[in-house]
Image (tube, rainbow, N blue to C red):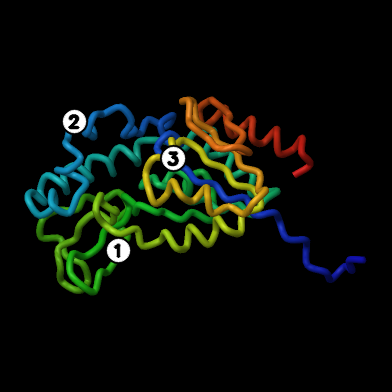
Amino acid sequence: MPTPDSPPPAKPLLVVLTGAGMSAESGIPTFRGMGGLWENHRIKDVATPEGWARNPALVLRFYNERRKRMWQCEPNDGHLGLARLQQRFDVRIITQNVDNLHERAGSRHVLHLHGELGKARGTRPPFAVVEIGDREIRLGDNCPHGSQLRPHIVWFGEDVPLISDAQALARRAGIFVVIGTALTVYPAAGLIDDAPPHTPVYLIDPAPVRTGGGIRHLQCGASEGVRELERLLADAGQ
């Protein structure tokens, strides 16, 4: 029997993996269907270490433009809905996105697998990470240890430093939700397999996605899907 001094019961752990479709309704473009192009740039020119080595000025300009656009966008109802779920759940978001829309919507626990546009890091050890907010990075801008700043983004061909933390979260999930990703980009796509057996799994994505048994696919966009998720969880008494 709880006493007046007893701590409140722990909230169920709801782990959410989000991809580009999460932010599409906010006006941030996705990779899908671009045939190797990202906003009219070849991915290998702006999202690889080799592209940075060839033309750092182009890479900085590309991410400066994306950072400016990010601050012009607002969280959509899907972002806001995940923040609302914190009232009933311990919500932990693992995102492949580099924008800050989850945080601006009010989500308190966000793990950025692929980096963050609002941060920069040095290019030589020790790799100091600095907050830059909406500022541009220019050639000649150095980290506190004296090396050129680059976007704090995990490019193709680079290790994903936080994948172990993400896997640890997925393995503790009481409910696992995937929003706005076709589960084709690894290692993030493998997180769904880390959820414990018999954990309820929901996938929110408007496109047909090949799923295994036991996954409930809500075939709609992020905002509509999160509203439906809230209803389903409430109906299930969760």
Q: Secondary structure at mark 1?
A: strand
Q: Which residue is mark 1?
A: 130
Q: Residue furthest front?
A: 213
- Label 3 and label 1: CA atoms lie apart by 30 Å
Percent position of residue 114, x then y? 35, 52
Which amino acid type is shown beneath numbered disc 2? Asn
Which amino acid type is shown beneath numbered disc 1? Val
Q: Residues within 10 Å of mark 3 (few under 14, many from 20)?
A: many
Percent position of residue 72, x then y? 35, 36
Q: Which residue is mark 3?
A: 183
Percent position of residue 73, x then y? 38, 35
Q: Which mark is residue 40?
A: 2
Hey, which quadrant is residue 149 in on the image? bottom left
Residue under the point 76% across and 38% down: 236
Q: Earlier in the sequence, mark 1 or mark 2?
A: 2
In front of the other: label 3 or label 1?
3
From what the image shows, is residue 155 above or below residue 143? above
Residue under the point 42% across and 32% down: 26
For the residues bearing labels 1 and 2, Cβ distance under 8 angstroms: no
Q: Nearer the viewer, residue 85 or 15?
A: 15
In front of the other: label 2 or label 3?
3
Q: Nearer the viewer, residue 100 or 192?
A: 192
Residue under the point 30% across and 63% down: 130
- Label 2 and label 3: CA atoms lie apart by 24 Å
